[in-house]
Image (cartoon, helix red, strand yellow):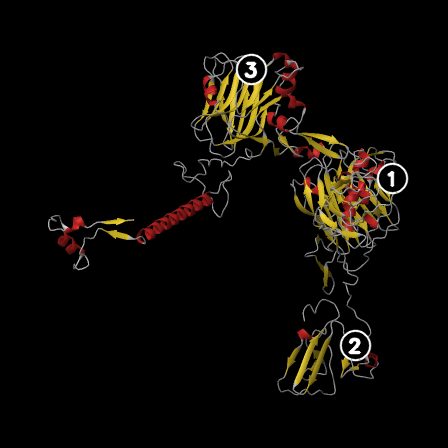
Amino acid sequence: GSGLNDGQWHEVRFLAKENFAVLTIDGDEASAVRTNSPLQVKTGEKYFFGGFPVQLNDSDHSLFQHSFQGCMQFIHVDDQLVDLHAVEEGQLGSFANVTIDMCAIIDRCVPNHCEHGGKCTQTWDSFKCTCDGTGYSGATCHNSIHELSCEAYKHLGKTSNYYWIDPDGSGALGPLKVYCNMTEDKVWTTVYHDLQMQTSVGGNSLEKFSVLQLNYSATMDQISAITSSAEYCEQFISYACKMSRLLNTPEGNPYTWWVGKANEKHYYWGGSGPGIQKCACGIERNCTDPKYYCNCDADYKQWRKDTGLLSYKEHLPVSQVVVGDIDRPGSEAKISVGPVRCQGDRNYWNAASFVTSSSYLHFSTFQGETSADISFYFKTSASDGVFLENLGNTDFIKLELKSATEVSFSFDVGNGPVEIIVRSPSQLNDDQWHRVMAERNVKQASLQLDQLPPEVRKAPTEGHTRLELYSQLYVGAAGGQRGFLGCIRSLRMNGVTLDLEERAKVTPGVKPGCSGHCTSYGMYCANGGKCVEKYNGYSCDCSTTAYDGPFCIKDVGAFFEEGMWLRYNFHSPGTSMKDLVSRTLLSSADPEITAPDLSLNKEELSFSFSTTKSPCVLLYVSSYTQDFMAVLVKPTGNLQIRYSLGGTKEPYNIDVDHRNMANGQPHMVNITRNGRDIVLQLDHYPPTSYSLPTASDIQFNSPKALFLGKVIEIGKIDQDIYKYNTPGFTGCLSRVQFNQIAPLKAALRPTNASSHVHIKGELVESNCGASPLTIPPMSAATDPWHLDSASADFPYNGQAIGDGVNRNSAIIGGVIAVVIFTILCTLVFLIRYMFRHKGTYHTNEAKGAESAESADAAIMNNDPNFTETIDESKKEWLI
């Protein structure tokens, strides 16, 4: 057997006969030990259980060696139950240091305090829960290891993918796997089923109805938890028909219906709503036959279709589709049901603002007798206040902000008050969101603040374990104490989210929702995106950036074919130059530039590109004067930035000659000019500073248009640019931004700026010019091959050098490449050699070779005038 010291009852059976003995534990025949060796088992008059007394020499005392510690019951000898009461009364046998008719071992696994299927094991005075494979953790397997929703994963910086979520946290529902689509402002949660699209039913079926069952990757309760907390849910449904009526509109009984949550039948179709026996075409009044409210109800012999979205989330998901009207000759139908898709998470942003120190919200008594967990977010500018409290006769539970750096969790289950305090190294009244997680169970209590290590307090092995409360749960001030001032969000207790917003609507001193999310989450809006406050969260405004996506991190780019170009006009019809410059080109952060100047003394240009053809024009900014700015790829593949701002005869050129930029790899370009100073950064190389000539003007006068791929401009154009302009740029451009405008994004995303864009050719969106692959250069200080690197640090054990390059990996990769190349060359040589010698030889043998002793003799015999040496005449031709 195994685990016999787990504090549980185990059965031991020993059977001995002549030349045969069997020992079995817990009735498991597989664990039986058998012997057929010759043996004899003889018992005396006495059986000893628990130990064997050894008589000491010259003493009346006995010593028990290795006595059993534990309990025994149902002792049988020769199938006869031993009467332990007779032993206790001295009528049968004797005992010492034994308590009869009771067991002092406490079965600490009954009841089992290990939740969610955790396995309980125990020692003499405690128990332990093994949570492996349950999806939960903690002393009693109470806490879910998964996030509550896709919304939570989004704010952890995750991208679209499959994730495990646990909608009720520590509640009874288990985790489920869903797909989280995070490409939009709102996160979509998708749950799939096994019904194939376009499932055929009917076709002279003998059955009057056909029932299609949908089996989801989650239980109905789990899906209901998702739909309940979501802001919006939908499910696509389609009915393709040929002589198969759907809802039998306008007056008949429906032939087909679907079954939703709680096994309720529903007689409306996609695009319609509850209580309306119509399809989408009936709502929009565009059915094939206007006499009917569904296309299929017209009963045509040709294929028709009724499709739409079911969006009443209280009825979702679809669990069955029952199809009728398929028993007639020629009747056919095809059913398609999409996955359940839900958007948003109301629980995640459910918040309330406490505006006075005496304000509070009250809820029903918290039920957490043996296991309780509480989690929430808070932000405040106050230094103390009670978060929540629930009282009993003597028992209580309480969470409060003790000071600007301390959070306290206190409770009493009858063994005296216990308080756990977590101290933060930084101020908590900084008006930023902070998270509190408290848990109390029969084994321990813990309190965690943000990402700090949790404070844990073990529970006593003996004593009271049940938390008995009777008063209402107060969130905020209670019993005359100083209440919390600030916001509390996403308050969950034992997996249930308390609806703070709904209760706050009818409570004075408390307001639903909370502002100021951007103070904590604004940092997630990248690449210049602006954080926008919302009632129940925030969003990132990417309109002034060259990026897209919920956090402004998705590149917007396009592929340019040869001869294609894009022009962005800074001045559009109906817009004055003054308004244009002040709104698009001029940065509001620059106090030196005002709209009437109609010129720029500062530009910020950034983009990435990839191409294999040179020369070409990447970007060109024209003006109503002779001023211009251009970024070119020269015939050598090197990059050139060209400025002409007046004051000099020739444009000022910045040539980047140290590498070929037309190598097909994505490259990133950042150019910043402020007055005479220019800073250029390529890829991950260090920025390089340049300066316009003293004679050059520093004003970019009257900007007109920005060109990508090719310059199509009226008037005089610089000769080099004119030469590079043919045939034009071929490749990819991405995340192009010039000051506050993003021309590619304006072309690919319909915005107010789209009217400024003109395109020649078909612009195909692509990110092939994004994410530079170029490896940054190794600094001289860390490059072991640099001439002056006597003190260079050599990387070892796979450790990456500071700039991210692993030198060892590069060397090993080079050696492997050389070895592979050598092997390939050897194989090619061998193959050519083998085929060369396997060919048919034709020799220029003379006649009479058959009778000659050798080929040389045959030649001489055939040609008496032969005077050349034998060696010179010996030739062979390979065919």
Counting residues from the start of the chain, the first of labels 1 and 3 encountered is 1
User: For mark 1, what is the residue?
Assistant: 480
- To which residue does mark 3 refer? 623
Give the quadrant of residue 675: top right
> Of the residues under marks 1 and 2, which one precedes in the sequence?
2
**Left or right: 291 in relation to 833:** right
Residue 749 appears in the picture as rendered = yes
In this figure, which residue is indicated by the disc labeled 2?
A: 74
Q: CA distance from mark 1 to mark 2?
A: 60 Å
- SS assignment at label 2: loop
Q: Position of residue 430 (x, y in %)?
A: 72, 34
Going by the numbered disc 2, the residue's amino acid type is Phe
Q: Quadrant of residue 381?
A: top right
Q: In terms of depth relative to the viewer, which is nearer, 516 or 684?
A: 684
Residue nearest the viewer, comparing 557 with 371: 557
Against 515, residue 57 (above or below) is: below
Whether residue 355 sits left or right of residue 518 in the image: it is right
Element at badge 3?
strand
> Considering the image in quadrants, where does the N terminus appear?
bottom right
